[in-house]
Image (cartoon, coloured by chain):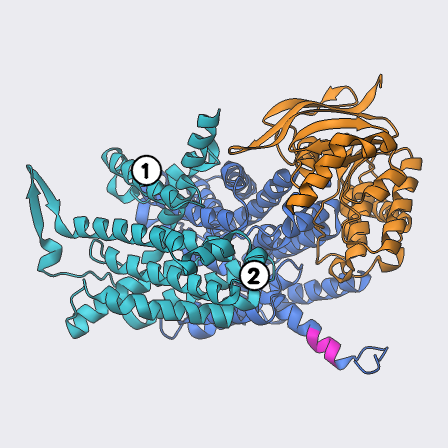
Amino acid sequence: MADPILEGRGLTKRFGGLIAVDGVDIAIERGEICGLIGPNGAGKSTLFGLISGVMRPTAGTVTFNGRSITGRSAHDICVAGVAVTHQIVRPFRDMSVVDNVMVGAFFGHRPRPRGRGGARAAAMEELEVCGLADRAESPARSLTLGGHKRLEIARALATRPEVLLLDEVLAGLNPTETDRTLDLVRTVRERGTTIVMVEHNLRAVRGVCSRIVVLVEGRKIVEGDPDTVLTDERVVSAYLGTAAHA
Amino acid sequence: MARNGAFAAIAIAALVAVPFVAPHAEYALDVLFLIFLYGAMATAWNLVGGFAGQVSFGHAAFLGIGAYATAIMTQNGISLWISVPVSALLAGAYSLVIGIPAFRLRGPYFSIATIGIGEATRLIARNWSSLTGGVSGLTLSSAPPLLLQYFAALALLVAAVGLAAWIRASRFGYALAAVRQDTDAAETLGVATTVAKTQALFLSACILGVAGSVYALHYLFVSPDSVFGFSTSIALVIMPIIGGLGTVTGPLIGAVIYTFIREQLAATLANVDLLAFGVLLIAIVVFEPRGILGIADRIRRMRKPPAVTVPDG
Amino acid sequence: MSYGLALIYGVLKIINLANAGFLMLGAYVTWWLFTAYHVDPLLAPLVIIPVFFLIGVGLERTLVRRVLGSEPIISLLLLFGVWLVLQNLAYVIWTGDTRSIENSFIESTVKLGGLQLSIPRLYVFAMGVLSLIALQLFLTRTYLGRAIRATAQDRDAARLVGVDVDRVMGIAFGIGIALAGFGGSLLSLLFSFTPDFGRVLSLKSFCIVVLGGLDSIVGVAFGSVALAIAEAFGVRYMPASMQDLISFVVLVVVLVALPKGIVGTLRSLRRG
């Protein structure tokens, strides 16, 4: 991997005495779909938080397109071109679906659409892609869980990201919705957006990701292509281990 | 949108005509003047409290700064053409000084800190006697003609409501609405939330600064306990909530109701008006947080049953 | 007072502005019992604590519960409305005249190694410390206390493990209001007051909470001491009329310099 679009080096995050992420090196190649997996509490969401600027790393650096974005604010990083969705959906509940997406279109990465009309057109385009166009004028709070997840994606896409971080967008979806969302992820990738996805659904990860990184207890234990990684002894025991404890 | 514009134009034309049609109805003109002034102030508060969801209990500080600045400059013979804009900018500058520490606090913490800001500003005004005349305040000698005051207050109201309407439909308005509903989510969509909040506070403070000028020139007297008083800050919170928090016309409706209730109750026991507003506030928040506009919306829906009937509920 | 604030906030995730009103009411009830029925001001809390507790529970049941699901500013505004009602009710009933309690106990002092100490001040301090300890024990040692803390941390998880969350929230709200009333009753021994009594005090209490950090009772105790020291020093350099500014200045300094509060900052320094 000669020229990663996004790179974290030695990323560490401590909460009080607890080390959530411990010296993780991660490099994301331009145009790939990279899966980030690991048992509950492995630090996946925290790692996303460190990259997207929601949290400041205790140690380590993040570079995006060769420039350091370490410790910059979340809105700065979004404008730079890294967008993130929330594991627990956070819609602007009292706004309509299209207004939610327009926030992303108005702000986010440059070049931005011109004026209210431009932002609306851009938002409608993303709603079309995410299959929410017919719900554009409904209040966001009226969506189903699957709808909320797609709204999260549409909103993040509207910021025109170069890298999109998806945090468990499949959790809680039924098989039909899961397939729809995976198709959506592939479509986004074909538009040239690099994707990193935290996911628990290993079958889905194997289907869509070209590469997988495994975190266990805040550390990266292995990375590589899906088939090799998912049969790796350490990965299997990490998953079976938590299953036995659960 | 076009209908709202036409309606606004007719309303403004009617209000402009009132003093010419009824030049001797001084009480009515006085009440209208108060409604304009309160309406502008409530609209200004609503930019921060309603649009951005940052409830401030210290907004009297900006009114007070505008009022004192105009009073002091007028005493020193400075023209209103200079003193009014300077008053606005001073109030705006003060909002930036305040905004930086206060916006480190989120939601309710911000609100409580603003109680402190209001109180601290009042205490400073009381103690800085060489500038402010201390507790006894400042007195001006001559007021501009009532007609001029009337039109100045109307112009301020139109400007404030116009600004609010423009903001609501703009990119900035989207930023504020996003901040109000989920600040963290807004951040991750590229909204510089602290900047947006600070901008809203600045605009709000400038409008209140001008309102302070109008106040000083109308009453010809400013004192720490009148313009900087907590009851002024409370009035600014109450009006938009009565009318409809975060809406364009809500604060104006609130100002009308507030002014009438106060005119009715102020003559009775002291503080009965605030007691009534407290009860009204609780009732609105519990039963219809969207205020009068929300109630109007409900009535409209009851009259116009939904076109599609759902069988068997 | 400030631990009342911390407790209510923790459990309900709302800042209770109504506390300022109940604090003031605690002072007035103490004064009223004393002047009208000659009840010793030291005994007034025996009436105030249970009555205010019930009022708090009732308030939570009838009003607060209805707005828990909506935007946080709604509950803030609701409690602000309650404060407004209490404050202006007090104006209507007792007028805006300054009141104070005067009896032999209030005037009494004791000599301790050359220092002339006011007995009511010592008494209030002791009661403050005692109730802080009692609250801490209640929250850590009893089932109900633990349930309150669990609910404060995660309402849904508490419900899952069988905590009667609705009941717990009502009780926690009641305790917070009872503590505010108790605090007001105690402070009426030291200060004269008006219906606006609660505002400056709740500001101080908020300052204490920001100083000490919201989550820990130790932090609250620590914040109280820090503010008391700052005020003691401030009095030497500021005119008396500016005294109430001190807590606010401290608040601004803390916010700008140490947004995590003093305890939080110490903690992160130690972990360095």
Q: Is residue B147 visible?
A: no
Q: Which mark is on residue B37?
A: none
Q: In which quadrant of the rendered image does the N terminus of chain B lie?
A: bottom right
Q: Which mark is on residue C159?
A: 2
Q: Which chain is cyan?
A: C
Give the chain letter at badge 1.
C
Query: What secondary structure do most residues of the magenta stretch adopt?
Result: helix
| Three-letter code for the amino acid on which mark 1 is drawn | Ala
Q: Which chain is orange?
A: A
- Secondary structure, mark 1, is helix
Question: On screen, C84 above or below B95?
Answer: below
- Secondary structure, mark 2, is helix
* Label 2 CA crowd tier, 10 Å (few <14, some 14–19, many 20+): some
- The quadrant in which residue C73 appears is bottom right
Q: CA distance from mark 2 to mark 1?
A: 37 Å
List the single residue furthest toward the top: A2
x then y, percent, for residue B94 = 50, 39
Residue B299 drawn in magenta: yes
x then y, percent, for residue B274 = 43, 67
x then y, percent, for residue C60 = 47, 67
Residue B293 drawn in magenta: no
Residue highlighted by disc 1: C226
Q: Which chain is blue?
A: B
Q: Could you tell me which residue is drawn at 67 percent across and 42 percent down?
A: A242
Q: Could you tell me which residue is drawn at 49 percent across and 45 percent down?
A: B66
